[in-house]
Amino acid sequence: METIKPLLDKVVVKIEKTNEAVQNGIILPTTSKDQPIVGVVVSRGPGGMIDGREIKMYVNPGDKVLVNKFSGTEITLGGQKLLIVKQKDILGMIC
C-alpha cells in the first residue's frame, strides 16, 4: 500500500465522514459548508526551521483533529480520502 511521508510542517489527515443520524435511523448529511473537517492524523512531517522560525510539531499519528474547511489539498490514495495541511491549519484536537 502506498503511503505519504509529509515534509516540514505538513500533516496528512484521513477524512472521516461527518454524517449525523436521527432517531429513526435516517442518515442526514451535514448541511453547513462552513463546518470544520473531522479527521485522524495519519502521518506528520518532522517540523524544523521554516522561514527562519523553529516549528515544533504538536500532533501525532492517531490524534483526532478538526481542520479548517478551506485549507490543504485533498487527495485519494488507496481508496481513502486524505487531506494534506500545514499544522497551523489544524484548529484543535478532539479528546
Image (cartoon, helix red, strand yellow):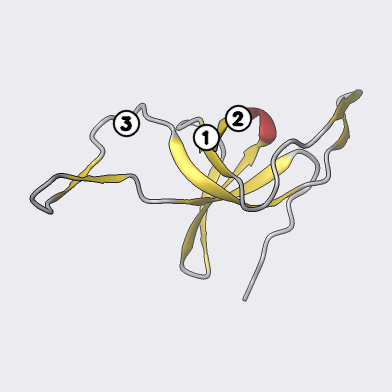
User: Residue 62 vs residue 80: left or right?
Assistant: right
| Residue 29 percent coordinates (x, y) | 23, 44
User: Residue 57 vs residue 65: left or right?
Assistant: right
Real-space Cα separation, disc 1 to disc 2, in angstroms: 6 Å
Please state which amino acid type lies under the numbered disc 3.
Lys
Instruction: Identify the residue shown where x is 55% and y is 49%.
Output: 40
Question: Residue 86, which numbered label?
Answer: none
> In which quadrant of the rendered image does the N terminus lie?
bottom right
User: Residue 14 vs residue 2: left or right?
Assistant: left
Please state which amino acid type lies under the numbered disc 2.
Asp
Instruction: Identify the residue shown where x is 43% and y is 51%.
Output: 16
Instruction: Count residues near mark 1 (Cα–Cα under 10 Å), then give few for <14, some for 14-19, many for 20+.
Output: many
Please state which amino acid type lies under the numbered disc 1.
Val
Q: Is residue 78 above or below residue 45?
A: below
Closer to us: 37 or 63: 63
The residue that disc 1 covers is: 67
Please identify the residue farthest to the bottom as the structure is shown.
1
Q: Is mark 1 on a helix, strand or loop?
A: strand
Instruction: Count residues near mark 2 (Cα–Cα under 10 Å), then give few for <14, some for 14-19, many for 20+.
Output: some
User: Which quadrant holds residue 91?
Assistant: top right
- Badge 1 or badge 3: first in the primary sequence: 3
Instruction: Identify the residue shown where x is 74% and y is 36%.
Output: 58
Instruction: Identify the residue shown where x is 67% and y is 35%.
Output: 86
The residue that disc 2 covers is: 89
- Badge 2 or badge 3: first in the primary sequence: 3
- Badge 1 or badge 2: first in the primary sequence: 1
Q: Determine contact: label 1, label 2, CB under 8 Å.
A: yes
Real-space Cα separation, disc 2 to disc 3, in angstroms: 17 Å
Nearer the observer: mark 1 or 3; the answer is 1
The residue that disc 3 covers is: 33
| Residue 53 percent coordinates (x, y) | 88, 23
Q: Is mark 3 on a helix, strand or loop?
A: loop
